Every structure is written in C-alpha cells, then in structure tokens.
Amino acid sequence: MAVHSSFQLPATPPDKQPGWIKRAKRAIPQPVRDALKPVVRKIYPDALSPKPWDLSVCDRPIGNAYTIHADGRELKFFFLTGCWKSGTHWVANVLNLHPAISIKGEHHFEEVIQCKHGLTDATWFMGHRTRLRTVAFDALDNVVRRMMYYSTRDKPQATFIGDHTPRLLVPVLNSAPHLHLVRDGRDVVVSWAYHWLRVKEVNTFLPQFRHLARKWVPLFEQEPDRFRDPSIGLLGDDEWFRHACRGWARYIRHDSTALPQLRKRGMNILDLRYEDLHRNFDTELGRLYRFFGLDPAAAEAPSEATKTLPGFTKVDSKSHYRKGQIGDWQNHFDERLTRIFKEEAGESLITAGYEKNLGW
Amino acid sequence: MATALKGMMKRVVEVVVPPPPAIAAPSRGPRNDSPVLGERPGIDRSIYEPSEGASTGRGDEAIATVHGKTHRLFFLCSHPFAGADRVGDLLNLCTQIHVTGDYHFETLREAFSDLKAHKWHAPFHEPMRTETERAFRDCVRRILGISSEMKPWAEWLGDRTCRSLSVLLPGAHHILVLRDPREVMVEWALEQFRSAGHHYSRDGLNLHLDVHRASFLKDAEYFTSNPGALLGGEGLLERLAGAWRHHTRSDLAALKAVADGETDARVLVLRFEKIATDPGSAVDEMLDFLGLDAPESAPDVAPIGEGFKPIDWRMYFGDDVKRRFKEAAGDTLIELGYENKHNW
C-alpha cells in the first residue's frame, strides 16, 4: 500500500509575496492600508494572500521515483553530478537557457544518501526492517522531490527539474536521469586552488590547511595574478596539492566503476566532457537538450551575460567564473606538480581518458 | 648476570611479542562546569516545559494521521543502559500507547542540518531553509507514524531511542529517563566486554582488556568474582564516563532550553530508581503526562519491573575507580542529585 497517500500534512504556508507588493506595503501607512484592503482584494485577489504551493504533489510519483504530475503536466527530476570545478555551474547555466528545464543547486543530496544508510543499515535500528526501510526511503525521496520542486518555482513552465551538485555519481532518486560531467584533473586542481583562495572564511578550510589560508588569502586579495607561480599559494604546498589530486582521483575511481553498473540497472546517464563542450559547443549543446527529448532551437542563445559561452573574454582570478579554459594547467604545472599529480592521480587521468600513459 | 639475562630475555620477548600500543591519555575535559540548570545542583522538578509568557508558537507538529486515524507522537530518550527500553516496555502494556525503537532520528537531524550548513548549499538560504526544516519534520512524522500499523488503535506513538534529549518536533512530549551513572557504568562495561563494542575496541584499548574478556566469555560470573577488573583497567572507565557526561550535559542543556522557552516541548523527567521502587506509579505518572486516564485495571507491571532491579555498583567501584570517575564525571553526578558532595 502506498504510504504517502495516507498521510495528512500541515498545510504549506503561503509563499512570500511578490517584491512590488512588499515595497508598496512598506511605503503606505497602516491605516491607509487597512482602508485599501477591501478594494485591493477585489481587483487583485492573490495580492494579499498568495496561493500556497502544493508540495504534496511531490509525494505521489507516477511510474518511477523521478516523475510527478503537477501544474497539469508531467514533471521529471534529474541530476547533474561531477567533481568540483568540473563545470557543473556552466552546464547548469546552459541547461537553464531552455524554457523546459529548470536546474538549481547545490542541494548536496549526498547528505540524504548518507542519511538513508544511517537510518537503516544498523541491524538493531527500526529502519532496518523491510517495511520501515521502504517508508524511510519513500519519505526521504519525498524530501528530495519537494526541495527540488520548491526551488524551481521561479520557472513554473519547466518540465525537467534538476539539481546540480559536485558529488559522486550515486543515485538519489532511484533510476533518475543523470548528467555526468568530467574534466581534466589537472585543470580541476588548478581551478580548485584558485577557488579556495577566494574563500575568505578560514574556518571553511580543513583544519590542516587553515595556516595556508591565513598566509595566502590576504595576498591573493591584493595580487591575484602572482598566483600563476606554482611555488606560492595552495599549489605551492605539497600536502594540499596531494590532497586535491587524491580528491579528484577518488571521483574518477568511484564514478568510472559506478557508471556502467548504473547503466546496467537501466539508469539513463549522459556522459559529458568539459573539453568537448568547449571544442564542439554547438554540437554538445544539441546533444544535451536532445537527452531530454527537447528541441535545441527552443533554447535561448548562449551569451556572456548568462555565463553560458565557453570561456570568458576576461580572466578574473577572483571570480567563481575565473577563466573557463582548457589546458590552463600547462600555465601552472612545473616539474614538481607534474610529479606529484602523476603519483596521486596519474592512473585516474588514464582511466578518464585524458592520457594514454604516464609519459606526459 | 641473572639481571642482565632477564633484561635480554625481556628484549627478545618484546621483539617477538610487541607490547600493545600506549593508549593516548583520555581527554579529561572540564570536570567542574557550573550546573546547567541553575546554581543549586540537581534536577528539582520532573516536568519541564516553557514557562508562562514564553512565546512558543506551538503548533500541532507532533501528530501524524495514518490510514485516516490521527496519532500523537512522543519521544522516550535516555543514555544507553539508563532504562529507556524498559520504560518503553512498561508503556506498551497500555493499550493507548505503542512505543518502538531505536529509530535514531538524530541521524536524520544531522543530515538535514548538514544540508543547510554552508552558504554554497541551496538550502542554506531562505525560503529553502525553512522548507528544509519542514521536510525534516515531515520525515520524522512519516517514519514514526507508520509504526501505528502494528497497533492502529493506539493514541500515542513513541520513539524509544537511546540518545540525548533533542526536540525534533516542536511541541512534542518527551520522557527522559535518568539513572545513577555508576550503575550505568557497570552495565555498559559489561556490555562492552560482551560485544567488544566501540569504546572497547577503539584505538587498541582492547589489547589491554582482552585477557579479561576471554575469561568473561568463558565464565559469565568472572567479574562478580573479580569486580576490580571490570572498570579497573586502563582507559575504559574514562571513555564511558566521559561519554556519559557529554550526553547528560547535553540533556541538561536541552532541559534548560525548554524551561527558558527557547525550545517548544514538554519533558517528563523520570528516575530509573523511582521506577524500580514503584513501577505502577511511574506508569500512572507517564499516563497523566500524556493526558491519558489510568486504565480501569492496572496493567501487570511485575514481569517488566524485574528489569529495573538496581545494581550494586559499590562492589565494582574501588577507591581508584571512584577517584577516576570523580575526575571524569563527578560534577555531573552531583548535578543530577545522586550525591551531594565529591567525597562519596
């Protein structure tokens, strides 16, 4: 029996009111507002009490865990994953050019995946029992759908609702379509180094690297261009660099094993390469939209304003969208970084198809 | 010559059978913190709820309607071996109550807190933040609510989990069971030896204790005959006492938050010792707390009451164990009212 249909939930409160109404309210004295309320209500009934969104539609998937019926049509959930700094934001921006797609992030649903295990793995937990396990997983799937549906309500005409989060390729909603993005690990770790230098809060660094943040972040603020020198900054610290290389390698090892297994289970996964998107942008764009069965011609044209073109005309080391180039690692890697990368992630680079051997 | 030979033999033995790694000195932590609930030590009332005038915004968050019937949800918490499971058994004698466990919703709580922990996470920002919290509560209600399928006529559905008191559903009823930690230490240590549990095995401590475990597994009365071995060994008492202290101070902080109106909940604090003395009265007290009438015929609590027999902790607490326990958790023992002074 479907559990979700039996539950009655507290009503979802109304969404926040449109901005112009809030500003108007602030400008008008209360006694005047009270007098105007009946008039406004007649002319614009939703102004004073906007309709609540019915999130309970997310609790009644149809046919599979990633399809619901809402707003008079079928909506499908999907996920964009990959290692950090592999271009997930860029691909999300590109996807959002199409009117039928709304993708937001980062929801970090890997916490939900961990929670599923935490609640149900231990044999003495109630969640381990078959019936409760089903209910718990069902409840957590509802959470994922609700959160994704809720966060994409600013584009209500979208029929494909997505989450982009840099995380391992692990299904959140069973058999939901995935886009799996890969980028050359050498560019990833260079980009990662710049990313962390932009982070100002030292406490967000791992404890063993906070001293690097204290040392380099102030200098990066003043002279970001100096950090092309691999002997300074985070790239200049062997321990940090090894940690970053191992992180990327872990993604490749995990995802390269997971991908064929998930495909065998019937999951629809589109492989994307950052470099292919750069080199064959229009072709890859078409492939991207057709994965959803959508007409590429319906998408808005990519532009610099929407941060959807490959690369940027201006390099801004202090921006999340820094450079957007392929092969930038060659401007940073010296003999030391090359040696360390080969030790920590060389095999993964071969697995990912970026090199044939370690002789690069 | 004999001494030199002994030294040589010792070195040979050390090479062949290396000594166990030294145990890192357990963190002592603060042992004389101010009492959490106020200047006067001890918990001096049994029901904690927001004081009058405190803004609670109370709503019906702690209900679940399943298959058309509305059930009220409550939570039964305690430290491990402090009696939550036995209190759950007592409550299950009542037809209007169905208690099951362990659910360990704190796992869910941590996951949802992590979802909105960082500013680069979408749920960090409003309105997603509020929606995430609402989704969490909905999850708890669904998962706990489905237990009604086992006893659909029950008015109250309870989660019995050995965890710290933390309010998952605003306005919910909670029952917190406290027990003399010295009895908890004995039962917990026995379980650790029996199962080679987490505290026993971590960081190589077991290498110092395995000799006792081997004897205990052959002879269940081993520690009765050798009581000093249960808690006397290196490190185990400090770990267990430290964990108990951390758990209990978290309970006390949660009670204070309720009493100060910062958290919306109602909490009944029960003492294991009181339940052991008169389980029938304890059941009446809990029924009253949940707003249920006492049943016309009182349930037979005797069989379950057997599980509340106190343990003679004194036989396991020699002077050295007492000293080490006082260092690790003596202040909190006094704050709970189990002793008045440190020189017990």
Image (tube, rainbow, N blue to C red):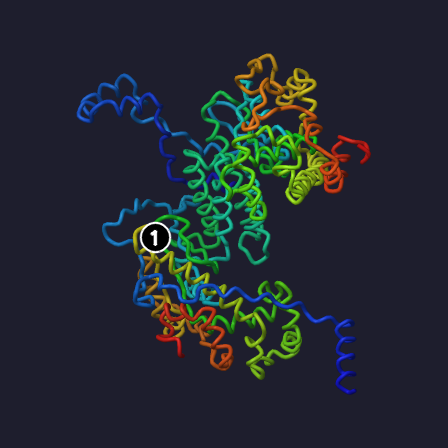
Q: In the rendered picture of this protein, how many numbered marks are placed on residues?
A: 1
Query: Which residue appears farthest toward the bottom when viewing the image?
Result: B2
Q: Which residue is mark 1?
A: B265
Q: Residue at x 59, y 28 (%)?
A: A225
Q: Chain of mark 1?
A: B
Picture quadrant where residue B329 is located: bottom left
Q: Quadrant of the C terminus of chain B?
A: bottom left
Q: Nearer the viewer, residue A227 or A54?
A: A227
The residue tagged with tag 1: helix, strand or loop? loop
Q: Nearer the viewer, residue B290 or A172?
A: A172
Q: With respect to residue B269, does A236 lie above or below?
A: above
Please state the horizontal and vertical placement of residue A343, each as a whole percent of the image: 75, 42
Q: Nearer the viewer, residue B188 or B17?
A: B17
Q: With respect to residue A170, does A159 lie above or below?
A: above
Please state the horizontal and vertical placement of residue B242, each as a whole percent of the image: 49, 65
Q: Amino acid at mark 1?
A: Ala
Q: Is residue A1 visible?
A: no
* A255 left or right, relative to B81: right
Please state the horizontal and vertical placement of residue B163, each as a whole percent of the image: 47, 58
